[in-house]
């Protein structure tokens, strides 16, 4: 077995066995938080050590309602050519299986009915709602025109988020209101 005397072969075997170990172990790296990735089973963004919820100065909590989805927070960032609106939702899928929030299952629009497209962010995990427990997910929309309200529709439920109260030029302590 002359092939086992080569350094490159041993290096290759060590690397492959390390990758197999990491794949089988199945744990997420410490830098990935379930609350930010939108995986099923994530209840909140609480720090497991201190029990505190991290706050973002550009995010304000929004009171929820009684539907399968509730608006948890709303954040707006100005960008060249438009605004990026991050909407954090909490709730269950309302189905027997997990539901991926795509452009077909969760639609965004202006009050006039103009569609608001999702913001494309490569390598961002899909937002998935679990059927049996509350899940916290964040969905991004891309607004190219001025709008005071973002209307979200999910399985017959309509949620309205007041963007005027959360615009970057408004006071930071204002909370968006739901009608």
Image (spheres, rainbow, N blue to C red):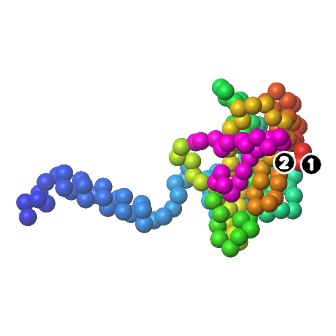
Q: Is residue 109 above or below residue 48?
A: above
- Looking at the image, tell me whether mark 1 or mark 2 is earlier in sequence order: 2
Tell me where residue 156 sits by quadrant.
bottom right
Query: Residue at coordinates 87% horizontally, 62% vertically from top-left?
Result: 66
Q: What segment carries the magenta color? A: 102-121
In percent of width and height, residue 21 lies at 39, 63
In percent of width and height, residue 77 lies at 71, 33
Q: Which mark is residue 2?
A: none
Q: Are marks 1 and 2 in contact (CB under 8 Å)?
A: yes
Residue denoted by label 1? 179
In percent of width and height, residue 22 lies at 42, 60
Query: Residue at coordinates 67% horizontally, 66% vertically from top-left?
Result: 130
Residue denoted by label 2? 160
The residue at the far right in this view is 179
Q: Quadrant of the N terminus?
A: bottom left
Query: Residue at coordinates 82% horizontally, 27% vertically from top-left?
Result: 169
Question: Mark 1, residues whose alpha carbon is within 10 Å: few (<14), some, or many (≥20)?
Answer: few
Real-space Cα separation, disc 1 to disc 2, in angstroms: 7 Å
Query: Residue at coordinates 32% horizontally, 61% vertically from top-left?
Result: 17
Question: Mark 2, residues whose alpha carbon is within 10 Å: few (<14), some, or many (≥20)?
Answer: some
């Amino acid at each position: 077995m002359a092939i086992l005397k080569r350094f490159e072969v041993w290096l290759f075997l060590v690397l492959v066995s390390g990758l197999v170990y990491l794949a089988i172990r199945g744990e997420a790296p410490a830098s990935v938080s379930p609350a930010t990735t939108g995986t099923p089973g994530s209840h909140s963004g609480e720090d497991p050590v201190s029990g505190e919820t991290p706050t973002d100065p550009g995010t304000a909590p929004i009171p929820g309602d009684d539907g399968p989805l509730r608006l948890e927070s709303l954040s707006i960032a100005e960008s060249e050519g438009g605004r990026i609106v991050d909407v954090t939702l909490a709730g269950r899928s309302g189905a027997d299986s997990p539901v991926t929030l795509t452009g077909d299952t969760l639609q965004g629009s202006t009050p006039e009915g103009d569609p608001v497209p999702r913001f494309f962010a490569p390598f961002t995990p899909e937002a998935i709602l679990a059927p049996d427990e509350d899940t916290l997910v964040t969905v991004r929309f891309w607004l190219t025109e001025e709008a005071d309200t973002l209307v979200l529709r999910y399985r017959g439920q309509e949620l309205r988020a007041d963007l005027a109260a959360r615009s970057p030029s408004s006071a930071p302590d204002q909370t968006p209101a739901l009608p």
